[in-house]
């Protein structure tokens, strides 16, 4: 994986010193809260429901064992012994004190980590495919391109006071495991007819108040122009994105209001102006970065392993992903125990996972946008031993992409923006559906506690949106969304439900699916074939 | 009726106005006059924020339940207690 | 070398900065003020006679002025480029990199702090207006590859 050189290290350390100075100025009164807010946000520090919250960047979701150990240490030393993995592959801590924040950033810098631009109206952490580099179906490893973008976007002098936040995702396979089309810019690395690598650019996707699937801006941007093309899009957005209304300030609104043709025309005009300015790093820089992502020393091994233990087989069938090297597998560690808090991991669990990564996965861990972790490089022969250790620590739920593998935002239990709690709904749903989840098959349930949609409810096969109805939590049900390559936006079924009613309602629609499904259909396929009406009928009679 | 809340600037703790300072316990909160009246909410908040005794103070609706004020809205009750899914954390865990 | 708040060695421009509309209508005007919503590219045909462009920041949160400044430098503008208004200490370094070479903050900034803030960053990851000049500090990727 990528390793800092003296420049990267110096930049992160400079940022720590800058933030330490800014915190001191805030505590002494030199800075008002209004002036301080964007500065702390650009270092990942929110003022949340119970305390400050710190969001630490996990660039393109890749961590080393040493980095994971540091995340555990921060949880113990500065927080309350746990952290929460997010839908943008980051980790956040819920009980941070402002006076400690500079020390935490300094600790992170010792393992080449930071919280730079994990919030604020700037370019956020670049997300990617959790199986990048090991997936059988990728045209290349997308992470070197994500790293190029990470460096370019860090401390960008023109794009740090954008109309609103800005999120990139970079993938390199036709199967979309990163909700790429639901990002401000989505990039799919592709090969053209001449077998050259380039970037297919999508822009204006997003969830939130006005969900949109990002249209394609350009089919093929040569890899050597990745930065200048991104720069052109950001400039058009910075100049013309709406600043009169926070809720209309994302790039999706600009793309929608201009129309994709006019937006594309403006981007291409800006690109024609910017590309000759030599803004793109030379090919040698990409090559330098790519060297860090060179495949590790895989052994020649045969495919296949003993899965005679039925409990292990359940886990292996659900949680393994094919690896491009024979004899290896990518194993997902589900952070979704039934009745648990989706995405939470204790410091002890993080330490154990770091240890397992060192012993079984060539020192690497990945974070997924579905709030799980992945050990990407496990020898198939080691899977059983790995599973036994995970199982002993409560880290072996065999539920990847099943009903209890629920994405849930922190909701009203932690978030000051939330209107309703998300986590208790996830817990009750998992308890209700876990006994039948293998029969239900792939079912992506996604829960948000407010319209900002951090829980991706628009992209759930079944989505749940918490709202505030006269001071009482109420939950709307949505059906038919997807954040994958079959991307679609879920539709609201009708009037909302209370806390118990929403659990019954989800069971009602899954029961209908079990009755009406045809061979091989997932829930979302049946919904798409039947349409909303029979589901409405079952729910509201 | 109105009580005042905000966060401690340095620690981020949720705090409530007690009449002569800020407490982590909502039960210690006092009801204050709303708005611009002399000695009312606006004056207290302005003074306390300027002294950095509190960060981002605002008014909260609450009722008097005998054992002290109870915020009317679930969000404020959550702030006062701690997360409903982690009863071992927050003020609620301190007994 | 000239220093805070004006990083230029030439004489200060004493002409009033007029609105973009007035500037375009007055062939003798040499100083213009740009508001966030204006299209700074309208100035491109007139760069030769321009001595001062003042870019207004009614609030520091409005980042359009950064693009306006960088565009002017990319188009070859060599005159004074002034950031005026809600210009705060923590934004100065980025403003310098976008091509601003003078500052008129609405609230006074201590000169020592301003100089320290502008000089804080030893390197940068990307080219901006500073990358247009010969002899300017190269971005990190250029340092890595000579």
Image (tube, coloured by chain):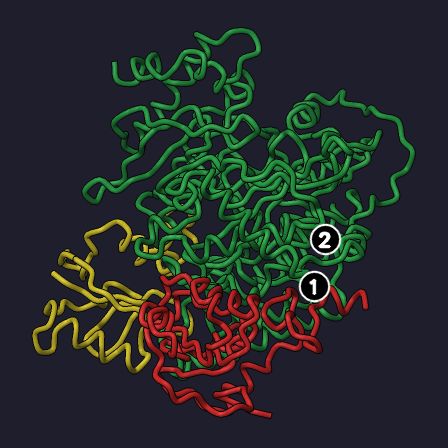
Chain colours: A green, B yellow, C red
Name the residue nearer the viewer: A4 or A235.
A235
Name the residue nearer the viewer: A115 or A110.
A115
The reply to whether residue A127 is in sight is yes
Relative image position of residue A441 (x, y in whole percent): 55, 19
Relative image position of residue C113 (x, y in whole percent): 50, 87
Write down the residue under mark 2.
A64
Residue beneath the point at 35% across and 57% down: A243
Per the image, label 2 sits on a secondary structure element best described as strand
Residues tagged by mark 2 and mark 1 found on one chain of the structure = yes
What chain is tagged by disc 2? A
| 2 or 1: tag closer to the N-terminus | 2
Residue beneath the point at 43% across and 63% down: C42
Vertically, is A365 above or below B71? above
| Residue A49, quarter of picture | bottom left
How dense is the environment of label 1, judged by Cα within 10 Å: few (below 14), some, or many (20 and up)? some
Q: CA distance from mark 2 to mark 1?
A: 9 Å
Residue A52 placement, left or right of A273? left
Q: Are marks 2 and 1 in contact (CB under 8 Å)?
A: yes
How many numbered tags mark residues here? 2
Relative image position of residue B75 (x, y in whole percent): 28, 52
Relative image position of residue C94 (x, y in whole percent): 53, 72
Name the residue nearer the viewer: C16 or A407.
C16
Residue B16 placement, left or right of A110? left
Residue beneath the point at 82% across and 24% down: A304
Write down the residue under mark 1.
A111
């Amino acid at each position: 994986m990528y390793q800092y050189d003296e420049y990267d290290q110096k930049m992160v350390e400079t940022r720590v010193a800058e933030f330490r100075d800014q915190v001191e100025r805030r505590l002494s009164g030199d800075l008002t809260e209004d002036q301080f807010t964007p500065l702390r946000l650009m270092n990942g520090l929110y003022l949340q429901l119970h305390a400050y919250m710190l969001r630490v960047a996990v660039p393109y979701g890749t961590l080393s064992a040493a980095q994971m150990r540091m995340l555990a240490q921060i949880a113990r030393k500065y927080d309350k012994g746990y952290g929460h993995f997010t839908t943008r592959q980051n980790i956040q801590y819920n009980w941070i004190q402002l006076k400690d924040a500079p020390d935490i950033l300094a600790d992170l810098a010792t393992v080449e980590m930071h919280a730079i631009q994990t919030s604020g109206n700037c370019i956020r952490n670049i997300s990617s495919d959790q199986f990048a580099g090991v997936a059988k179906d990728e045209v290349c490893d997308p992470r070197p391109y994500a790293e190029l973008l990470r460096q370019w976007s860090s401390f960008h002098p023109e794009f740090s006071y954008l109309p609103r936040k800005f999120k990139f995702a970079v993938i390199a396979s036709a199967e979309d495991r990163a909700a790429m089309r639901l990002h401000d810019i989505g990039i799919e690395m592709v090969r053209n007819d001449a077998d050259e690598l380039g970037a297919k650019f999508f822009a204006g996707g997003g969830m939130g108040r006005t969900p949109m699937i990002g249209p394609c801006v350009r089919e093929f941007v040569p890899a050597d122009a990745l930065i200048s093309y991104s720069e052109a899009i950001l400039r058009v957005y910075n100049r013309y994105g709406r600043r009169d209304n926070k809720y209309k300030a994302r790039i999706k609104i600009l793309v929608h209001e201009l129309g994709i043709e006019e937006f594309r025309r403006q981007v291409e005009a800006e690109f024609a102006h910017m590309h000759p300015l030599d803004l793109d790093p030379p090919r040698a820089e990409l090559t330098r970065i790519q060297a860090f992502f060179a495949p590790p020393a895989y052994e020649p091994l045969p495919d296949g392993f003993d899965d005679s233990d039925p409990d292990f087989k359940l886990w292996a069938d659900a949680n393994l992903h094919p690896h491009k090297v024979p004899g290896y597998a990518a194993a997902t560690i589900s952070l979704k125990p039934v009745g648990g808090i989706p995405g939470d991991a204790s410091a002890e669990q993080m330490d154990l996972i770091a240890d397992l990564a060192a012993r079984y996965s060539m020192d690497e861990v990945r974070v997924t946008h579905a709030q799980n972790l992945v050990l990407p490089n496990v020898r198939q022969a080691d899977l059983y031993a790995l599973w036994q250790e995970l199982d002993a620590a409560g880290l072996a739920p065999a539920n990847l992409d099943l009903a209890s593998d629920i994405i849930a935002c922190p909701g009203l239990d932690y978030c000051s923006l939330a209107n309703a709690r998300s986590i208790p709904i996830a817990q009750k749903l998992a308890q209700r559906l876990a006994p039948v989840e293998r029969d239900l098959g792939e079912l992506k349930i996604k829960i948000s506690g407010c319209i900002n949609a951090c829980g991706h409810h628009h992209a759930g096969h079944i989505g749940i949106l918490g709202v505030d109805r006269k001071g009482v939590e109420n939950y709307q049900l949505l059906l038919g969304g997807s954040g994958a390559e079959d991307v679609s936006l879920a539709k609201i079924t009708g009037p909302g439900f209370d806390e118990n009613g929403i659990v019954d309602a989800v069971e009602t629609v899954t029961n209908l699916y079990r009755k009406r499904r045809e061979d091989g259909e997932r829930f979302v396929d049946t919904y798409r074939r039947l349409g909303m009406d029979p589901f409405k009928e079952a729910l509201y009679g | 009726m109105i009580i005042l809340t905000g966060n401690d600037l340095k620690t981020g703790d949720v705090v409530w106005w007690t009449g002569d300072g800020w407490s982590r316990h909502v039960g210690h909160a006092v009801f204050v006059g709303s708005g611009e009246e002399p000695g009312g909410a606006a004056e207290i908040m302005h003074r306390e924020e300027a002294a950095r005794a509190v960060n981002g103070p605002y008014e909260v609706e609450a009722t008097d339940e005998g054992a002290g004020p109870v915020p009317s809205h679930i969000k404020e009750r959550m702030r006062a207690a701690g997360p409903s899914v982690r009863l071992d954390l927050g003020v609620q865990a301190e007994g | 070398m000239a220093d805070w708040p004006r990083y230029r060695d030439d004489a200060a421009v004493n002409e009033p900065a007029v609105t973009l509309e007035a500037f375009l209508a007055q062939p003798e005007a040499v100083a213009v003020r740009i508001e966030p919503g204006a299209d700074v590219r309208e100035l491109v045909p007139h760069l030769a006679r321009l001595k001062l462009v003042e870019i207004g920041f009614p609030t520091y949160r409005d980042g359009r002025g950064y693009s306006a400044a960088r565009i002017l430098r990319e188009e070859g503008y060599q005159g004074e480029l002034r950031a005026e208004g809600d210009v705060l200490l923590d934004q100065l370094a980025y403003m310098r990199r976008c091509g601003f070479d003078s500052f008129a903050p609405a609230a006074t900034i201590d000169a020592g702090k301003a100089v320290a803030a502008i000089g804080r960053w030893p390197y940068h990851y990307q080219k901006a207006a500073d990358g247009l000049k010969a002899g300017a500090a190269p971005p990190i990727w250029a340092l890595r590859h000579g």
